[in-house]
Each structure stands twice: as C-alpha cells, then as structure tokens.
Amino acid sequence: MTGRKLIASAVVLALLQIGFLGWIIAGRAAILRGGTEVLLKVEPVDPRDLLRGDYVFLSYEISRLPASLIANIPADRASSADGPVTVRLGKDADGYWRARTAWLGKAPTPAAGGEVDIVGHLSAGWTFAPDTTLSADYGIERFYLPEGEGLAIEQDMRVRPFGVRVAVANDGRAQIKGLMDGDRMLFEEPLY
C-alpha cells in the first residue's frame, strides 16, 4: 500500500505542476489573443543577459509619470508606498498611446472607448511634489531577441523611433506582442 500511495502522490504532484505551468502559459496567451492592443514608444537601456541571451531592456514614456498626473494622492501623504498604479492611456495622432491620468491602486471608473487602463507597480519612496517624476514598471520592460541581434537593435533604437505593440487585458495586465521599427514589425511574440 505504501508504494501505491507514493506513486499516486507523485502523479498528483506532477499533474498539479503541469496544470500550474499550463495556467500561466494560457493566461499570457489569453492576454495576447484578446487584450486591447496599444503601441508604446520605447527607449533602449541594455542588450544582453548571460543566461537568456540578447534582449532589449525597454523604458517607456509611460514609465515616467509626473506626480501631477496622479489624481488620487492622499493629502496627508508626501511619498509613495510600494503598490500598484493604474495609468489610463489614450491614443495620440502619431499612433502612440500616452498617459492621460493615473491613480494609486485601481481606477475609480472603467476606461471609456478609445482609452485603456494599464496596471503598473510603483516603488515606495517617490515624493509627490508637483514637479516630481515617478518611475513605474509594467512587467514589459524586457524583450528577448534572437542571439546576436540585441546590440544592433539597441543601437538602431538610439537613432530612429521604435515602438512595442502591447496587449492589455481588461484587468490592466500587459504582455508584449511585438517590437516595431517604425511601421515595420521586427519581431512578434508567439502565443505559446
């Protein structure tokens, strides 16, 4: 009986692990398939990861949020706490989506037509002075590339405009769909 219980336990554990990994992959694919697509303007930072290969570390215009853009700063709070920030994006005439307003935590109302809410993370310690710029992360700051292409693309990003097509789910989570060189898709993320 002990041997059968051990085998059954191992099978159940293996199925749970496979199910968990499948759930993570399916969640990412669902955002890529059904999320609202936005185009964000990017700036490169660093092109190499020793373990995973070439990548471009991306910084977005929406990564730098003026404190004056945040609509719900508590009057008694001088600096940010570690937590979520919701940024409402709107599409400009040049095709890029830019921050219109932001909230600490959740947005008080759903985004209207032509707008999208993306949820990021704001670290503790940013001052809320009106002239301060806060830095937010959205989980879409790295884009992995085929080996040997990271440095060339990073150099190209410094001389001409690049963008990233991002799918944003209804709950504000974001996934990179592809890297754009102007109007041309350079690399597209597969669903799976």
Image (cartoon, rainbow, N blue to C red):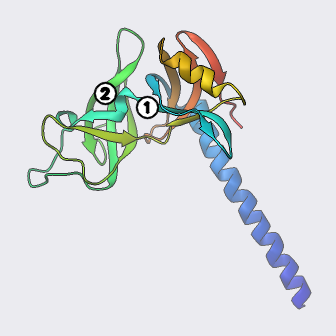
Marks 2 and 1 sit apart, C-alpha to C-alpha, by: 14 Å
Q: Is residue 24 left or right of residue 37?
A: right
Q: Earlier in the sequence, mark 2 or mark 1?
A: 1
The residue carrying pointer 2 sits among few (fewer than 14), some (14 to 19) or many (20 or more) residues within 10 Å by Cα, namely many
Residue type beneath disc 2: Ala
Viewer-closest of 113 and 175: 175
- Choose top left, top right, bottom left or bottom right for residue 62: top left
Viewer-closest of 39 and 37: 39
Q: Which residue is mark 1?
A: 59
Q: Which mark is residue 99?
A: 2
Q: Say if 54 sits above or below 17 in the image.
A: above
**Residue occupying the far left of the picture:** 75
Tag 1 secondary structure: strand
Q: Position of residue 139 (x, y in %)?
A: 49, 42
Confirm whether residue 113 shows in the render.
no
- Choose top left, top right, bottom left or bottom right for residue 43: top left
Tag 2 secondary structure: strand
Whether pointer 2 and pointer 1 mark residues with C-beta atoms closer than 8 Å, the reply is no
Q: Is residue 155 left or right of residue 112?
A: right
Q: Position of residue 182 (x, y in %)?
A: 52, 10
Nearer to us of marks 2 and 1 is 1
Q: Position of residue 68 (x, y in %)?
A: 16, 34
Residue visible at 61% across and 33% down?
55
Residue type beneath disc 1: Ser
Q: Position of residue 141 (x, y in %)?
A: 49, 37
Residue visible at 26% across and 55% down?
81
Quadrant of the image containing the N terminus: bottom right
Quadrant of the image containing the C terminus: top right
Q: Is residue 65 left or right of residue 47?
A: left
The residue carrying pointer 1 sits among few (fewer than 14), some (14 to 19) or many (20 or more) residues within 10 Å by Cα, namely many
Residue visible at 58% across and 32% down?
47
